[in-house]
Amino acid sequence: MAKTNWSVPVTEALRAEGVQVAEFDASATPGFRPDKKLGAKKTAELLIEQRRPVLADLQEKLYANGRSGDSRSVLLVLQGMDTSGKGGIVRHVIGSVDPQGVDHAAFGVPTAEERRHHYLWRVRRQLPRPGQLGVFDRSHYEDVLVVRVHDMVPPEVWRKRFAEINTFERKAAESGITIVKVALLISLEEQRKRLEQRLDRPEKHWKFSPSDIDERAHVAAYQEAYQEVFDLTDTEYAPWYAVPADSKWYARLAVTELLIDALGTLKLDWPAAHFDVEEQRKRLRKS
Ligand code: ATP
């Protein structure tokens, strides 16, 4: 296993328990030296540079076990404001593993069909299959974040959802899904820079939406909403990690390490052959 240079385990450094969102330092690098070169090198080591990169190796074991009847899976829930780097995590971290072992789902504004159902309906159907690494790019948390901030349903409706979400996640965990929830938190200044870059570069214009600027006026309401999400839905079976995301290198390293930790808890090994290896070797020689 590669050395990771963390001064404390990543799960301790980033656990959302006790985090005050309004005072959060999005430029910090908890548990790791503020050294971009070192951080990027570590991430590359874990994701691509070794003969068997750590994350891809663990994911392949998860997949192999899934094919052999193991019902377990892992789910990464990614939340964050526009430009917080969700897409980069999916491309760079998740993109380093075998795509056939990934169940990726993005949750945008609900479609007409989705609106006809309970808000968890579309989420339940996208839970990862056995052996898969699931990724939720936004999630059911939108139903207590954007929905709350923009008064899309009355408070008595979204308020009930925290307990409902906990029950939903507890059942998912009991069915064999290891859940890792990541909130990518960026500062308003960093978001301004990233939005400016989108405006400066024609190839980024498709990612820009004028409403991204309107959302910036609601930052205090979002902070309050994230605070309650952390206070009410950070559980042992579905923990939240508050990841400072002003430094892309740090956020990518942190999510890589969180996934490695989650997969590590499954103590995966290669499934035993369901045939006699020697016998098959002999048959092969003769064939
Ligand atoms: P992203 O910002 O995630 O990169 P995007 O800007 O390309 O994505 P979509 O992925 O189409 O847009 O949709 C994301 C938008 O959908 C976000 O503004 C999000 O708040 C909104 N959204 C997601 N779930 C809900 C929901 N349950 N109710 C209302 N709006 C939602």
Image (cartoon, rainbow, N blue to C red):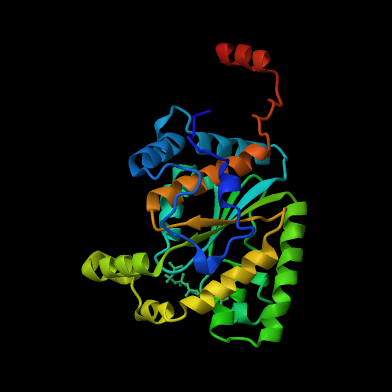
- Residue lying at the far front of the rendered structure: 23
Asked if residue 109 shows in the view, the reply is no
Residue at image x 75%, y 58%?
Answer: 170
Residue at image x 61%, y 35%?
Answer: 61
Q: Position of residue 183 (x, y in %)?
A: 53, 61
The foreground one among 245 and 144 is 245
Residue at image x 73%, y 57%?
Answer: 172
Q: Position of residue 98 (x, y in %)?
A: 49, 42
Residue at image x 59%, y 61%?
Answer: 19
Quadrant in the picture for the C terminus: top right
The foreground one among 33 and 200 is 33
Quarter residue 68 falls in? top right
The foreground one among 153 and 155 is 155
Asked if residue 91 shows in the view, the reply is yes
Q: Position of residue 81 (x, y in %)?
A: 46, 68
Q: Is residue 14 above or below residue 199?
A: above
Quarter residue 238 falls in? bottom right
Number of numbered labels in the structure image: 0
Quarter residue 166 falls in? bottom right
Q: Quick check: 159 left or right of 108?
A: right
